[in-house]
Image (cartoon, rainbow, N blue to C red):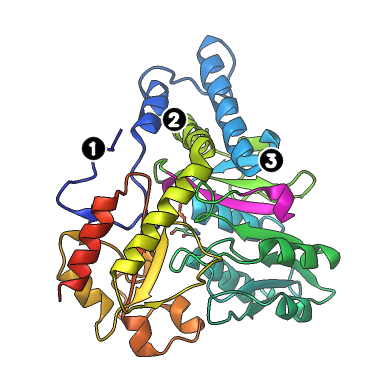
Amino acid sequence: MRPPGLRDDVVYLDHNATTPVDPRVVEAARPYLETHFGNPSTTGAYAEEPRRALHEARVHVAELVDADPSEIVFTSGGSESDALALRGPALAPGDHLVTQVTEHPAVLRTCAALERAGVRITLLSVDGFGRVDPAELRRALTPRTRLVSVMLANGETGTVQPVAELAAIAREHGALFHTDAAQAVGKIPVSVTDLGVDLLTIAGHKLYAPKGIGALYVRHGVPLEPLIPGGGQEDGRRSGTENVAFAVALGEAARLADESLGVEAARITELRDRLHDRLGEVRLNGHPDHRLPGTLNVSLPGVIGRDLLAGLPGLVAATGSACHTGDPEPSGVLTAMGLDRARALAAIRLSLGRWTTEADVDRAAALLTQR
Ligand SMILES: Cc1ncc(COP(=O)(O)O)c(C=O)c1O
């Protein structure tokens, strides 16, 4: 069933900014808003069903990323998960943290704050496709390196990083590895075991759950200081009375994603490539192969992406990360990849999703090429 918020007169190709909530997710969460209001941390009849549902949601999220349910901490979203992953290991002044230039601001700004507190930060560069060179990570590591944070997939370009390789290098050196998988989970197979990561960020609103719910995978045995101390919920790793309805929503979204991952990825890749073909002479920004199924970032010749989209009310897409809108500067992600200013300003990001049809991509291509 198509979410009622998707309009027939406006093609929505901005799923990397946020996804509509799947109507099945809404239905799964509804009883925990309307009926089962009990506090899952209390005892007695009212607590039982919320507690059971919270556990089931944790199981679904864990299954999607190949983790144990006890390794899943519910948070308020991707940004909080990133902050908990970076601050939780409690780095001391003089400790070293390695990250890379195209991370989401939730990572980069947390690193900047840690740097002000005396932690040494190294920012790895990326190549023209937006990928980190594992050899550069190897060179950056020092005996004081405690944590490495490299995202699994970039939201602007869809470029997927060689995380398994990077995590193995970090592990060899005894450093923890965090990956921000907010843009990857639910779109491509993600296994914390195969990746070999210690910490992994999940954001609900990128996989058809509501905004304001997310999770952090924390490998067994990784010590973590809570960002929010208090009643000791989430095994002491994130206090605050649990948002049961939204956790259930995330659990159902994870279950649905798991169910259709392979088929959906193939369908969306095909639609994305059809859209690319129909745009004619454009330059692809991001990796041609190591890329999310639904992400197409292209520079159209002789345009300013922002102006182009502003003149096309029948199409919703993006020119950079959603968090950067209002910023007249070219995308920092694209400039970090070495794109010149004109090409970076000409970029548009088209991101497809669960209800995107062939008719949608054909209409989008027609609008973008009618100039
Ligand atoms: C890679 C990445 N990390 C983190 C976030 C932030 O997630 P949230 O909006 O749930 O805080 C986003 C959202 O755009 C993202 O793309």
Disc 2 from disc 1: Cα separation: 20 Å
Which residue has dot 1 on it? 4
| Residue type (three-letter) at the residue carrying disc 3 | Ala
- Please name the residue shown 59% across and 63% down the image: 151
**77 in relation to 1, above or below:** below
The spot of residue 292 in percent (x, y) is: 49, 59
| Residue type (three-letter) at the residue carrying disc 1 | Pro
**39 in relation to 304, above or below:** above
Q: Is residue 191 magenta?
A: yes
**340 in relation to 132, above or below:** below
State the image quarter where residue 156 is shown.
bottom left
Secondary element type, mark 3: loop
Disc 2 from disc 3: Cα separation: 22 Å
**Which numbered dot is residue 67?**
3
Label whose residue precedes the other's in the sequence (2 or 3):
3
Instruction: Specify the segment rendered in magenta.
Output: 190-207
